Each structure stands twice: as C-alpha cells, then as structure tokens.
Amino acid sequence: MSQHLTSLPVLLPMLAAILMLMPPCGKNLKIRRYVSVFMGLLTTAVSVSLLAFVKGNSTQVYAIGDWSAPFGIVLVADPLSTLLVSLTSFLGLVCALYSCAGDDEQGSFFHPLLHFLVLGVNGAFLTGDAFNLFVFFEVLLIASYSLLMHGGDKRNTRAALQYVILNLVGSSVFLIALGILYGTLGTLNMADMATRVMELQGDDVYLAKIGGLLLLVVFALKGALLPLHLWLPNTYSTAMPVVAALFAIMTKVGVYSMMRVYTLIFGEQAGELSHMAQHWLWWLALATIVMGAIGVLASQDLRKMVANLVVVSVGTLVALVAAQTVDSSAAAIYYLVHSTLVSAALFLIADLVGKQRGKVSDRITAGRPVAQPLFLGGAFIFAAVTVIGMPPLSGFIGKVWILESTLESAHGHWFWPIYLIASLAVLVSVSKAGSTVFWHHTGKGEANTEEKAHPVQIVAVLMLVAASPLMVIFAGPVTDYAQFAAVELHNFYGLIQHVLGGR
C-alpha cells in the first residue's frame, strides 16, 4: 500500500467529489456534509501519513501507469510537496466543517467543488510534469470559478468575471510557454527539463528564456504578484468568507511553482539561464509588499484588509524565493504555512463579526457590539498578534527568520526597510481595526444573539487559530522540517536521481 500512498491525496478528493454528486448524497445535504467532513479528515490523515513516510524514507516517485519518467507522468512526493499537501488537506477539512453551519446551503454543490479544488491544489503540489501542472491548475481554477459564484450577488459576480477572464488569459500564456519549452527541450518532465537546460546552445537559449519568462508571468498572475495582483483584493473580499479562507492556499500554488521552476529548472545549474528570473522576482516582490501594505492601510472593512494581507504575504514569499538560498527557502516554507493558516482564520473571524454586527457588517467603523465578544475578540487578538509578527506567536519566529535569511542577500538593504515599514503599517491597521470593531459601539442596538456562531464554526476557527501557538510550542521540530525541506528543494542532483534514476 505504501507504494500507492503518493497518489491518494489526489485520488481521495476526486472520489469524495464524485460520491457527493451521486445518490443518496446528491439530494441529501445532511449526508453530503457527513461524507465531506469524513473524506476531508481521511485525506488529511493520508497526507500527514505521506509526510511522515517521506521524512523517514526520502522522496517518493509514483509513476502513473508504471510508465517511468521522462516518458510517463510522475507524482513526486518530497518534503516540501508533502508538507503543502498536508496543509491543503487540513484547510479543506476546516472549511468543509465551517460550511456545515449553513454556508453550504446558499448554492449548489459546495462540497463537491471544495474537494475538486483540493484535488487540483494537491495535484499541482505533487506533479513532476510541467504540462500536468497546467492540467491541475485548470482543475483548481474551474472549481474556484464556481465557488466564487456560491451565494453571490451582483458585486460578487463582477469580481468573479474579472477573475475568470484574467485566469483564462493566464492559461493561454501558460500553454504558449509550455509549447516553446517543449519545442526547445523536447520534454516537459521537470527533472528532465533541468538536465537539458544545461546543454542548450545558440538560439535555443533565448527561446528557453522566453518560455521561462512567460511562465513567470503566469505564476505572477496565479500568485497575485504586482502588477497582476489587482484581482485578488476584490475577488477575495466579495467571495463568501469560507471560500476566501479556502482560497488562502491558492496564491501559494503560484509561489510554489516559482520555487520549483526557478530553483530546479532555471536554478544554479542552468548554465547561461542560471537564476534568470531572480532580478525580476526581487523588484516585483518588493513592489508587491509596498502595494499590499498601502491596501491594508486603505481598507475599510475586515475582509478587504485580510485580502490585502494576503498580498503582503505573497510579496514576502517571493522575495525569499528570489534570495535563492537554503536559509531563505526554509524561512519561506515556515512563513507559508503560518501565513496561510492565519489568513484563513481572519477571513472566518471577519465573517462571524459581520454576521453579529447587523447592517454595519465587518466595516471598520463603530456599530452594534458582537454577541460573543470573548470568543471573537480573543480569536482576533491571537490572529492579529500572529499576522503582525509580534512575540510570542509564530509570526514573530517567521519574521526573525525572514530578516536573518535575507541579511546577506543582494537586495537585503532594500528588503529590510520595506518589509519593516510594511510590518508597521500592518500593525497600525490591524490594531485600529480591532479596537474599532470590538470597543467602539454606537449604543443604538444590542448584540444580535440570534447570530451567535454555530459550534462547528467555533471549532473550525479554533483549529486555525491554535496553529500559531502550536507552531511555537513545537518550533524545534517544525523549523527542523522546514530546513530539511529546503535542503531537499535545493538538492538538484538528488531530485534528478530520484525521478530519472540512472539516466
């Protein structure tokens, strides 16, 4: 069974989605909820088991149909991909649980679409083939299009339309880039591409560079990197909060793709194309951090503020990718997990706050007091301290590690002041938002006790909020694993050996 473990994080969500489209699940929401949460729990358990197996037995390569690379499609489970698959599966479980309080009633097929999206994201993390990276991108995007429309209104539809159009253009560019690279290299297996890039000469070098830079455009769009980030704040803030929480992992797919492509294929061993995107990534990352921080300061409601916090986190991660060192990659891995979970938690907290404040909703202005100030206020404080990067929670460890890993980098003298000023902007904005929402009341109304959070919503929020102190309590094993994953990410010849064997 262990040899098939690598395929299960992809197969189980697909099976879950299909089951929920068939009788009796298809017509019975209660049964669909039980199946969704159970399959989410099973996918999470399998993903964590795969992570533990890889940690103890090194990288696993699963050849689909028993066709070995580079001729067949392979799934590659290394320390980084298995960590992100576990993170995705856990986030999918939390969102499935949260939606059972009633969000899944506002549109059709919420639970099947959720599992199809998890299928696409897990597949994108595990695939060792560039074309199948495109395929899994399309799977997750098609599911995300429908989820954006779930329970939507005119404002939601407009934002979703922009999102769909941009991603269709991005998909077209992706195919063009893959066509150029396949014509130049003769393969789309990423490990095989890495070995052939080193041998390019003459005009083929320029063609491969064009293909590689087109991929950068695609990944910048998927990851919401400036100037292709403008879709994210509107899209995430108008989507249902449980959907926005689930989407917290989607920008990380773009960042992960950058880590893979520009470390493995166009990394240190790429000859004339070595680190070809590094300069671009640095300046785009710094500009994204600045624009994200401005967006946070300008936000007038909690959901828009959290959406802009996601933009800041993307800029930070891409700056770490651009540094191209083992330490910066380790810091990026730790920060990626931390930022995904805290962003998802803040979206759900904003949802509960908005429901309990009546017409004011989650706008950052004085209004009706919330019905559960102790729970929501405490959860918001924990999440706020985490996202700001203050001790003693995981954000502080991540921030210190980020600053330390970029100290000797080529653009560190630019990154430090920009990142610290952006952190100050986040501190001011989040503090203002929290004090306004929870302390400033109009006195014209009492708390709406009818909109108290459902027990499953409370459990879901606590599962996300608890991740930050747990990442501190178990900081030793967590940081050791991040370092281990980063070393394996930069282990060029080790990955080639795992995927291609003796070739």
Image (spheres, rainbow, N blue to C red):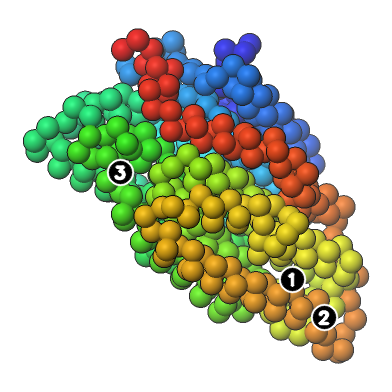
Kind of residue at badge 2: Trp
Q: Indicate the secondary structure of the residue bearing disc 2.
A: helix
Q: Residue at x 35, y 41 (%)?
A: 262
**Residue 427 location, x and y as percent?**
65, 72
**Residue 373 location, x and y as percent?**
87, 70
Q: Please tell me in which quadrant of the rendered image residue 10 appears.
A: top right
Q: Earlier in the sequence, mark 2 or mark 3?
A: 3
Q: Residue furthest front?
A: 408
Q: Nearer the viewer, mark 2 or mark 3?
A: 3
In the image, taking residue 274 as reference, residue 324 lies left or right, namely right
Q: Earlier in the sequence, mark 1 or mark 2?
A: 1
Is label 2 in contact with label 3 (beta carbons under 8 Å)? no
Q: CA distance from mark 2 to mark 3?
A: 50 Å
**Residue 300 location, x and y as percent?**
62, 79
Q: Characterize the local packing of mark 1: few (<14), some (14-19) or many (20 or more) Cα atoms within 10 angstroms.
A: many
Kind of residue at badge 3: His
Q: Characterize the local packing of mark 3: few (<14), some (14-19) or many (20 or more) Cα atoms within 10 angstroms.
A: many
Q: Earlier in the sequence, mark 3 or mark 1?
A: 3
315 up-or-down from 501: above or below: below
Q: Indicate the secondary structure of the residue bearing disc 3.
A: loop
Q: Residue at x 84, y 60 (%)?
A: 453
Is label 3 in contact with label 1 (beta carbons under 8 Å)? no
Q: Residue at x 83, y 54 (%)?
A: 458
**Residue at the disc numbered 2:** 439
- The disc at residue 354 is 1
**Residue 44 location, x and y as percent?**
69, 33
**Residue at the disc numbered 3:** 275
Q: Characterize the local packing of mark 2: few (<14), some (14-19) or many (20 or more) Cα atoms within 10 angstroms.
A: some
Q: Nearer the viewer, mark 3 or mark 1?
A: 3
